[in-house]
Structure formats: C-alpha cells, structure tokens
Amino acid sequence: MAILHRKHFDVIVIGGGFYGCEIANFLSLQFSHIAVIEQKDALLSRASFSNQARIHAGHHYPRNLRTATRSAINYPHFIADYQRAVITNFDSYYAISRLNSKINAGQFRLFMQRAGARIAQPQPKVLNYFDSSIIEDVFLAEESIFDATVLKEIVLEKMIQNKIAIALQTTAIQVSGLADGKISVLLQDVHGATETITADRVYNCTYSGINRLLADSGLPLLSLKYELTELALVDVPPQFENIGITVMCGPFFSLMPFPALQKHTLSHVRYTPHVEWQDSPQDMHTHVPLALPEARSKFVYMQRDGMRYVPALKDVVYSGESLWEFKTILPVTESDDARPILFKKNCGIKNFHAVLGSKIDNIYDILQEIQLDITSL
Amino acid sequence: MKIENYFISVLIVINKYHKEFDCYIADLGDSLMSEYENYEIVFVDNTDDILVQKEAQELLQKILNLRFLRLSKKQGQNRAFRLGLENVIGDCVVVVAPENDSVSAVLEIIAERIKGDRLLVGVTPPTDKSVLYRACLALSSWYCKKFLHVKIPVHATTLCAIGRPEMLVALKDDDVSREFLLTAIRNGLPYELFQYHKQNNAESDLKKLFGIMYEVVFVRSFQPLRIARSISFIMSAANFILLCVWVLAAATHSGQSLSDVFGVPFFLINMTVLFLILGVGAEYAERILYRLTYKPKPYIINEENSHVLGFINGVQRNVVIE
C-alpha cells in the first residue's frame, strides 16, 4: 500500500511541526500538490508542542533588538490569525534581577520602548511575590500564550481545506537530486516499507533532525547547536494560576501556564538544558538521535533557584512529568540570545531548502522570505 | 540509597589555582553523586587568571552539577565569597578550601549537618606544620584545657556547613553584621562553636551566633601567644646564628678555650628560654583574667563596636574588608 496517493508533488515539506505545516499551507496558495511528511503519529507533537507556549511580543529578548522588534511586529498578526488558540486572560510579569543580570530595569524599560513592546507597572500585591532584595523591578508585559492542542486543530483544518497530503509515522530517509531537476525523497513507514516520491522543491523543516537528513543524504551539514531541554510540568498555588513569571536576563527561570495540559511549565536557563552539543560541517557523526532519551528531572534545582526570587515557588508541586525536547539553535546567536530563523537555500541540491524555525509567532518572517525566493525564480 | 530530601551546596572560592584542584573537584563530585541525589558544587574563580576559565570549561564538561562563577576581575575575598553565597541554592552550604579539607572531611561535615540543624565547623589536623610547631601547639592546648578549661582549636579551616537561614542572615543588607559574619565564616569558625552546638543542640540565631563568636574570637585570637611564639622563634633563630658565628670564631681564633667559646651561646639560650616563659606566662595571665571576667552574652556588632571587625582581620588571615 502506497504511503501517499501520488508519486510526484510540486512541494514536499519534511517535518510536520508548526513551521512545516504553515509553510505547506502558505505554498498551497501557489502550488496544487503538496505533501507533508511527519515522523510522529501526529502533527505539531514535538518542539511545536513542547515549549513555553509563549507568544512573544519582544519582552523576552532585551539584548537583541532585531528579535525583539520582529516579535513585537508579528505579535498582533499572530493573535488575530490564531485567535482561537490564544489565551489572553493571564498576566505575564517580567522581573529584573539585581544579581547576575545582563540588563537592569532601566535598560529593560528603555529597550522595550524602542522595540515597541508594551509594559506597565504591576499591582502592588504582585510585587509581594518577589524578594525585593534581589529583584530590582517588575513589569507587567502585554504577552499571551497559546494552547498547543487548539493550535494544532487550526493548522490541521487549514491543511485539510488546502488539500495537503499528510503522511504520518513516515520518515524521510534520504533526499537526492535527479537529472531532470526534480528531487527524490526516500520514505520509510513505521513498518519499514520504503517508497520514493519526487518533487520540484523540498523543504527540510525537521528542526533538530535537519542535519540527520542532510548527513544521511550525503549533503553538507549546517552548524547547529543542540540542547536536550526539560520543561517541568508543575501544579501551582492559586495565586499563580493565571500568571506567568519570567526573571530576566541571565541564568534565571520562567513559570508559564501550559494550557494544553492544564499545568504550568517551570524552566530555567541553567537547568533546562541537560546536555548540549554541536554539529558542524566537519563532524558528520554527532547529529540528534531520533528518540528522546530519558533523564532525571532537574525540577528541584529549578525550584530552589526560583525560590530565591519568588519565595512562594516552594509551594509549586512537580507533576512527575516534564516536556523534553532537543532544542536547536544557531551557535552564532548565543552571545546576544537572538533567535533568528534559518533559511538555508539549496542545501547541496537545487531547490532543497532547510528551514530552522525559531519562535512560533515569527512564522510570518519565513513565509515572506519563501515568497521572495519563489518570486525571484 | 541516595539521600533525596536534603540539598547540598558546596562552595569553593579559589584565589590561586593549583593543578591538583581538578582532581579534587572530580573526587568531590563523584563522592557527592554517590551519596546525594540533589547537590551542587559552586566554584567561584577569583584568580584573575584566564587559564582557569579554560580549565573550568573542561571540568564543567566532566562533572555533573558543577557551576562556575567568574568575577570580572580579581576582587577582595569577601566579595568573591559573597558572590558564591548569593548563588547557592542548597539547604546548607558547605564552604570548602581544597588545599585544607579532604573530600572525606567534607562528606563527614555534611552528614553531621543532616543529623541536625547545627552550624558546623570542620577541624583539620595541621599536617603541613613542623614537629616543633605542633609540639608547642599541643603543649599549649593541653595546658589550656587542663588548667583553664578552655579548648583551643588546633587548626580550624574554612570548612563549615551553614544552614540556609544563617546564610541569609549573612547576606542581609546590614553591612556591618554581614561583613562580620562573612569574614568569620570564610575564616573558619573554630571548633568551640561546633562543640557548643553539639552539646546544646542550640539554634543558630544571629544573637546567639554572635555571642558564641565573640567568645571564639577572643579564645582563638591569642594575640599575645602569637607574639610570644614569634619572639621565641626569633630568639631561637638568633641564637643559632650566633652559635654558628661563635663556632667559626673559635675555629679561627684557636687561642680561646672551649668554655670561652660556648659561654656566650649558653647565655643566649638562657635568655631565649626566659623570653619564652615570660611570653607564654603573660599570655596565660591574660587568659586567666579573661576567663574570670568573661560571661558569654549576645553580641551585636554595630557602629560603636565595629572595631571588632578590625580585630578579627588583624589576628586571623590579614583580611581586608571591602
């Protein structure tokens, strides 16, 4: 039985995360036959699900004006386009640490003004949550979160409407260029059966799997850095139910609601990454494994450090589960914490492109670039 | 079975880097990992040496739960120590000096701390000191214990286990008391404190802590004895030099008799012993007076009596409070 109903597509998108699916939806306006290949048994089930569910409005990037500004610009668009998945009835507080912070409160305020990200003074009772001896100031940020489950529904509805072919539990094993300019993609289903399909253009949107596919296809790798990350799923005391807390800017923590599971996520810049490593064009052997490994939770560490800034975190209870993911970032962006999207055109094969997504709300930036690329041909 | 319900922070402030330090950290990490589920080793680099950062990066790759804090430039010891205290997250912080404190001693003090909320201070035998030094120290300790009923710390190190509440007191914004406590903790609270808490199972609130430390400071300072000891060593050295000179003189002036040659050295030796007895006697007299007049009491450092800080600085490790 064939994995897909056709042998040739105008576009194949490998990777059924938010970026892959939305690129497919976008391209369906210009191309008739599009397929999305996803290794897991559901779309948006990996990095698009296992994140802080934060819709960035720029506050999170006070050391990179480009990322902050793009987030501030894209924020209202995302809110409007995915309204059903957006949750606005929560307050997001950004606290600036006196210790070890790379910015101070004055700089944060000024930066947000420049980036166009809105901030306000919180209510006095909120200030009591924080230890004023090590928290310099607290800001109420205009920021929202999304429900990853509803977001998936919205994306899937659009894909069905756009008649995009979806192959779940299917792995793209290899990509190769053909003499006629087409690109062949070797697929393997969950039973081990293989099949080759072709396309005029292929987008590799597999996030942490980008280099794995490139390596298996004998193509040059990209310089990527990986972190095995943990977001601890926690239950919070009543006063924290509808708020998110982020301490900036350095080795601090975030406590954010996670609507898809009716929990909160606790993450920490120091403890969320458990292991990190890097791929480079010279090293073809260190790419990310397919399955997520099991690791011991660092919740206790996150909580204890967080309690120094917000003492009431002692009442946060670990649910016993965490969201694990291979976070993939560009090594060049580490110093300023920027999170640009990587759009690598023609990865060893003409019209075989790689897209490394970043923040979910910055999807518009890559769609714009893809449109420019198509128009230029 | 690893201990899960107690979080250990081990704080190491390095002012001078030694190559052996890597092995020490590795041993410490392995030992902690085998006994505790939740721990961290916080390594504050106050060396102003760029090579240490490279070494630390390698350590970070190898050792679990190691944290590396680097000061932008070499700072005073108190500031480096404070940086470490500000960053630890454990139920108790164990302050360790790798050059003094064996890994087993660190584990021992952690185990003691877990048994009860006492402020603990480690004591390490002075293995690197000379036989003469140890003999003098042992003799004076025996004398004080026997006749003055005062237990002298043989050699207190920086190794101590501080509970989080005590540590937070140390980090309070009250500059004077904070610096006092920081200095005292960093310099190693002496053995009496450990004994006191062991016997009384007392809570370490600030007043009581300062009360104990007040006693400890005076017991431990021993300034006159230090002077007397210094004089005795100086006199001994002088005596030896003079003896050598005299022997040389005797060898070159063969007309002198043996008794003439050795008459002056014998006098010098007698004077040395007299100086020693006087010095030690003066010290003991002061201690007896102190013992008679002293009553343990809470002692809060404030602006009026903050000169005690200078006292601590002077008699311990020549610390400059910044």
Image (cartoon, coloured by chain):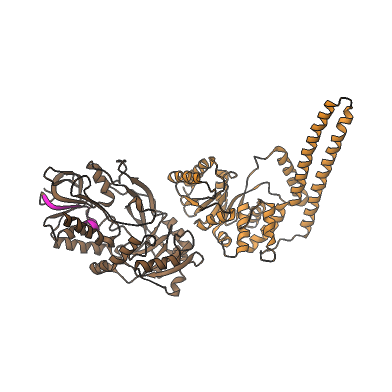
Q: Which of B185 and B319 is in front in this view?
A: B319
Is B85 or B231 nearer to us in this picture? B231
> Does residue A106 lie above or below B184 as drawn?
below
Q: Does the magenta stretch include residue B171?
A: no
> Going by the picture, which residue comes out furthest to the top?
B254
- Decide whether residue A12 is among the magenta residues: yes
Q: Give the chain ID for the brown colour.
A: A
- Quarter of the image for residue B252 reads top right
Q: Chain B is drawn in which colour?
A: orange
Q: Which residue is drawn at 71% across and 49% down?
A: B152
Q: Position of residue B240 (x, y in %)?
A: 78, 35
- Residue A96 visible in the current orientation: yes
The magenta-colored residue range is A8-20
Q: Is residue A348 left or right of residue A101?
A: left
Residue B164 figure quarter: bottom right
Vertical placement of B98 versus A45: above or below? above
Relative image position of residue A363 (x, y in whole percent): 25, 60
